[in-house]
Image: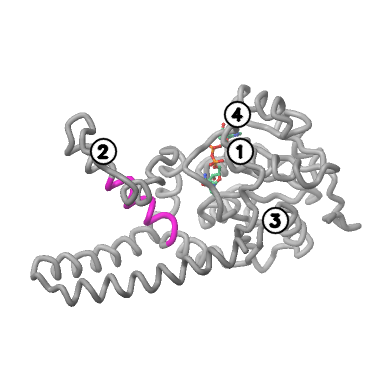
């Protein structure tokens, strides 16, 4: 598959941020599309050197403007609260509208706000995106060329976004075998607060609470599969999640409040010895979780 069109030639891709998400995209393209030239940049020289050594990128760039001027599409794969600063650095190289810019940030409202602050509006050539794929590991050595296979990527173009720019970013993700969905920014942040941000908050809080109660983490010696499954994501990168929660605070608080109300109801049923009420909650939850398992099975074929 090629994503080049006469309006949008696509021979060179720039990736800024070569951690789990950026390096996995480079590795995935390397595995599937050998003709695309990939330029990489990262604030860490060691990461840039490692991405070159692993063969994920063709060239490491220390000058972001140079990377941007030489790329047809640039993917920003840096923590969400760093995006505004990167927009500011790249702005002089984007003015002619030749380069399509996209990002992978887990929150989209903050990307819209940063773009408006730096460019005066969300530019037609900016197509915000978010791959719904990842892991609790981070950094270039965690990269996985199949990370996006059978996963969804949400793009949040606005009414002023150039359709050829959206098509270009869509084709990029489809090359790495992801399925692309379009969504509004607000809907994205609401949905992700419920399905990703709340579970991470609960996992972090549970592990922290048990760790503080337990002398030298002694309690974890007696934990097994259920605890492992529920808390795997508490091993995720604290800096990345710091940024995500601060960037999506309101939507996360809304869903957290609804969850706490429900938890109080479950607590009341337990305190009252109301087995029927507990059973109803568990039955409903199992039904919903089984439905989710079937969705996952269908997605992976
Ligand atoms: N990890 C996940 O599960 C996941 C999933 C979907 C989206 N995301 C989003 O992807 C983005 C990157 O996450 P990640 O998991 O790859 O993180 P990561 O920590 O593995 O990688 C981030 C990389 O960006 C570099 N970096 C940071 N600031 C920079 C800057 N100003 N200029 C250049 N390089 C910079 C870091 O050195 C690092 O190599 C975040 O916005 C995150 O919200 C993460």
Confirm if mark 4 falls within 8 A of ligand 1: yes
- Residue 240 in view (yes/no): yes
The magenta segment: 195-206
Q: Outermost residue, left direction? A: 272
Residue 186's mark?
Answer: none
Q: Which of the marked residues, 1 or 4, is nearer the chain's N terminus? A: 4
- Residue named by callout 3: 177
Q: Nearer the viewer, mark 1 or mark 4?
A: 1
Residue at 58% in and 67% down? 298
- Mark 1 → mark 4, Cα distance in angstroms: 17 Å
Q: Residues within 10 Å of mark 2 (few under 14, many from 20)?
A: some
- Residue named by callout 2: 220
- Mark 2 → mark 4, Cα distance in angstroms: 36 Å
- Residue named by callout 1: 143
Residue 43's mark?
Answer: 4
Q: Secondary structure at mark 4?
A: loop
Residue at 76% in and 65% down? 163
Q: Secondary structure at mark 3?
A: loop
| Quarter of the image that includes the N terminus | bottom right
Q: Residues within 10 Å of mark 1 (few under 14, many from 20)?
A: many
Left or right: 57 in relation to 105: right
Q: Secondary structure at mark 1?
A: loop
């Amino acid at each position: 598959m090629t994503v080049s069109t006469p309006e949008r030639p696509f021979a060179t891709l720039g990736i800024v941020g070569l951690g789990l998400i950026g390096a996995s995209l480079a590795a995935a393209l390397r595995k599937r599309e050998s003709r695309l030239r990939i330029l990489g940049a990262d604030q860490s020289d060691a990461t840039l050197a490692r991405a070159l050594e692993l063969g994920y990128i063709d060239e490491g760039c220390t000058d972001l403007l140079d990377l941007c001027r030489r790329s047809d599409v640039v993917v920003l794969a840096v923590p969400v609260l760093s995006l505004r600063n990167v927009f500011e650095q790249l702005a002089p190289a984007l003015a002619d509208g030749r380069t399509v810019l996209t990002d992978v940030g887990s929150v989209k409202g903050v990307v819209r706000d940063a773009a408006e602050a730096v460019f005066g509006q969300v530019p037609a050539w900016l197509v915000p995106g978010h791959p719904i794929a990842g892991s609790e590991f981070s950094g270039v050595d965690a990269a996985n060329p199949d990370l996006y296979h059978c996963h969804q990527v949400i793009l949040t173009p606005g009414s002023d976004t150039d359709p050829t720019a959206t098509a270009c970013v869509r084709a990029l993700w489809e090359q790495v075998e992801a399925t692309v969905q379009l969504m509004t920014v607000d809907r994205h942040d609401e949905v992700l607060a419920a399905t990703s941000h709340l579970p991470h908050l609960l996992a972090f809080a549970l592990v922290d609470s048990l760790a503080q109660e337990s002398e030298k983490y002694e309690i974890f010696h007696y934990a097994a599969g259920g605890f492992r499954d529920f808390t795997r994501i508490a091993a995720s990168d604290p800096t990345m999640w710091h940024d995500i929660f601060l960037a999506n605070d309101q939507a996360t608080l809304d869903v957290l409040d609804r969850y706490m109300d429900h938890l109080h109801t479950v607590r009341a049923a337990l305190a009252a010895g109301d087995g029927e009420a507990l059973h109803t909650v568990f039955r409903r939850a199992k039904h919903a979780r089984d439905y989710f398992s079937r969705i996952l099975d269908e997605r992976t074929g």
